[in-house]
Image (tube, coloured by chain):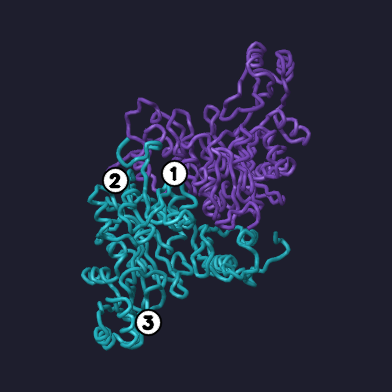
Chain colours: A cyan, B purple
């Protein structure tokens, strides 16, 4: 048996750092390919830890734990971007394959590194500057206007680490708390888009249709695939931009390029080099899901077809809402799942098995169809019912309720 | 937390007896529903044991092992029909839910019990008799003609336990070896069909389109969905037959009714009360797969939409062939998977992770599309390449090979 293949099956072992829902859904894809995802989880109750056979408990910041994870695996990949770059270099130095590699991944870890790289590549992005002092921010604001946006270069996600500031005083407090920041001009945007591409070490790329992401409070709430009314030329330009970035940065695996659509075109917001919330719709909505494609890409398998399976797919996140609050007195989760299935027999549920807390991403639903408004109404009503126990009047429960 | 729900997730725990590929694919469906399938496997290397978090090693004929499996589970169900009926009654007596229950399941376990039940229900089936002696067989042959078919009432599958006999002497030898047998008249059939239905304890039923199953050497090789050129009236009659049987027998979960299509209509061959090879196409080809539907049904969740996702779906089994033989010198499995993906980027692979042996069901592939001939050629060529390493000339490998 060649190194890195499972002696029981003759097939590869992909090891994923992180035990969240992305690892959970990647395991589902791995099962079809004859594999079993190996997962480094922080606790056995993590989303992927509950459903995978090959779980190591450990810390993604601990090099010894990472070495345990990599031992005997074909390739190491990620469910999040929080592994220290030097650890990834150490894994590579020890002969392990890491995908994406640390020199690519850093662009998804550090927003300042990304901004510099995009500037060098002359790719479209918001006006930006590294700021170390209130005076730096003052200068940036004088040129680009107020309010402006300050971001922590590392560690932010789902709106965390992003601050809209109105004057140098606010900026000074943030600099005191966080150190060096990234300043960005506020973008007058039409909406947010995401362009997803997979790239293999061989250099093969596969792109899905560009989607619209609908954010609420800085968190993805819905994804509309394909992005409605997006001019074909702009869709193609966004896809080409994503492919250029994947190639230039040497990405291996999935890349999501989060974009601001403006009156003039698109600007790059940030990158994720892993399966991404904006691609969950691909499980049912595309011939090859982002999870299967990520496995194929990091293993240097040929990539799968990205054709859509229906004209329209809408994914709606279930964020912990009223029903996740400690004082919730409505139907418990299992009962809400019953109602969901009774009322939306063609909405597909993905529940992550995590503890319910307000604001937490607990699951998602996907609906497919021909008419965007109808599909979107169905998906969002189903998600809202799961999250809040609130029934959209358009889908009022009737006598057929069980 | 109500009894039978997982305290970590607030959702049910389905326990499945058997760790084969049906359990493996049911686990994939369970993950989406927020669950983790609990599996009773005979060895840790079984197909489902490789990928599930909650595996008990044990023997499905051992009541103590079955009690361990059932403890704390919401419901016990099956990946095969080999659990002794008295053990299932014992589980029920101890307060466990078993789905399908023993009084239903026995019709999938014992072909004589099934024949009697169908006769009582006046459902169409081949001429049959219980035979205990060569004289019984002689009498049956005199009325129904030779050759005739003898079957062991229990334990047969994939063509095992089925014998075509030409005279009373052959019959006598089989009766000596096996005891009481089922005699059936040979059916002058057009082809074999399968009608699948799911039924919940509440009594809700859901049916998929009737499919054609193509057998080779008594083993399912291909499934064509929907069955091509099946008159609508006959398709509806087959679906109604399946629903009647599910209701009459009190089936809970998936029921596959294997049918012979004759010049006059359909005759019932046998039943399976679990996900079935004839329904693997539903993973990609229907809005709700048989595996998700089985979970929904045994949990008394409302059932999902069975609408097809494409006009045509073809599933082709990968049976251990030349490439599974000990002297195989061609590309190993992982390399064949590479080639498969390169040449059929829209064929979906399901590999079961089992040891490769000639004749064994190792995996399957599914193709979707609009034109039966094209879809079928694609699926069967891909399956044949995996099994035998033989490239169909219509899909000759070219320069793009990687």
Residue B128 found in image quarter? top right
Seen from this angle, which residue lies furthest top? B169
Considering the numbered disc 1 on the image, is that residue within a helix, a strand or a loop?
A: strand
Going from the N terminus, do you reach mark 2 or mark 1 first?
1
Near-viewer residue (A314 or A219): A219
Q: Which residue has dot 3 on it?
A: A164
B237 relative position to A387: left or right? right
Percent of width and height locating residue B165? 63, 17
A285 relative position to A152: left or right? right
A253 relative position to A24: left or right? left
Is disc 2 in the same subunit as disc 1?
Answer: yes
Considering the numbered disc 3 on the image, is that residue within a helix, a strand or a loop?
A: strand
Seen from this angle, which residue lies furthest right? B120
A89 relative position to B126: left or right? left
Percent of width and height locating residue B362? 46, 35
Q: Which residue has dot 1 on it?
A: B349
- Asked whether disc 2 touches disc 1, contact meaning CB atoms under 8 Å apart, the reply is no
- Name above or below for residue A297 compared with residue A176: above
- Asked whether disc 1 touches disc 3, contact meaning CB atoms under 8 Å apart, the reply is no
Instruction: Indicate the quadrant containing the C terminus of chain B: top left, top right, bottom left or bottom right.
Output: top left
Is disc 1 in the same subunit as disc 3?
Answer: no
Q: Which mark is residue B400?
A: 2
- Name above or below for residue A396 compared with residue A91: below
Residue B229 visible in the current orientation: no
């Amino acid at each position: 048996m060649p190194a890195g293949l499972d002696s029981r099956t003759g097939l590869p072992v992909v090891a994923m750092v992180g035990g969240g829902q992305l690892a959970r859904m990647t395991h589902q894809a791995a099962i079809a390919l004859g594999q079993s995802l190996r997962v480094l989880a922080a606790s056995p109750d993590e989303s992927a830890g509950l459903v995978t056979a090959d779980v190591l408990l450990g810390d993604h910041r601990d090099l010894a734990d990472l070495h345990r994870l990599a031992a005997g695996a074909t390739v190491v990949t990620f469910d999040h971007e929080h592994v220290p770059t030097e650890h990834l270099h150490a894994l590579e130095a020890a002969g392990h394959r890491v995908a994406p590699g640390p020199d690519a991944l850093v662009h998804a870890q550090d927003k300042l590194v990304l901004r510099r790289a995009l500037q060098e590549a002359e790719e479209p992005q918001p006006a930006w500057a590294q700021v170390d002092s209130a005076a730096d921010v003052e200068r940036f604001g004088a040129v680009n206007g107020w309010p402006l946006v300050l971001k922590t270069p590392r560690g932010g996600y789902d709106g965390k680490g992003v601050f809209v500031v109105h004057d140098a005083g606010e900026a000074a407090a943030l600099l005191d708390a966080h150190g060096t920041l990234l300043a960005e001009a506020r973008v007058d945007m039409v909406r947010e888009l995401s362009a997803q591409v997979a790239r293999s070490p061989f250099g093969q790329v596969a792109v899905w249709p560009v989607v619209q992401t609908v954010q609420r409070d800085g968190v993805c709430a819905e994804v509309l695939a394909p992005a409605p009314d997006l001019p074909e030329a702009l869709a193609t330009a966004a896809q080409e931009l994503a492919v250029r970035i994947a190639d230039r940065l040497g990405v291996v695996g999935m890349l999501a390029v989060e974009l601001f659509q403006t009156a003039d075109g698109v600007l790059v917001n940030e990158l994720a080099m892993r399966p991404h919330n904006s691609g969950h719709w691909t499980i049912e909505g595309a011939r090859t899901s982002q999870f299967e494609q990520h496995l194929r890409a990091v293993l240097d398998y040929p990539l799968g077809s990205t054709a859509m399976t229906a004209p329209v797919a809408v994914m709606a996140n279930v964020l912990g809402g009223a029903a996740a609050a400690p004082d919730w007195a409505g139907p418990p989760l299992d009962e809400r799942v019953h109602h969901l299935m009774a009322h939306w027999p063609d909405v597909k549920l993905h529940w992550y098995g995590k503890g319910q807390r307000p604001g937490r991403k607990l699951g998602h639903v996907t609906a497919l169809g021909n008419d965007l408004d109808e599909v979107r109404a169905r998906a969002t009503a189903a998600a809202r019912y799961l999250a809040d126990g609130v029934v959209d009047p358009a889908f009022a429960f009737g006598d057929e309720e069980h």
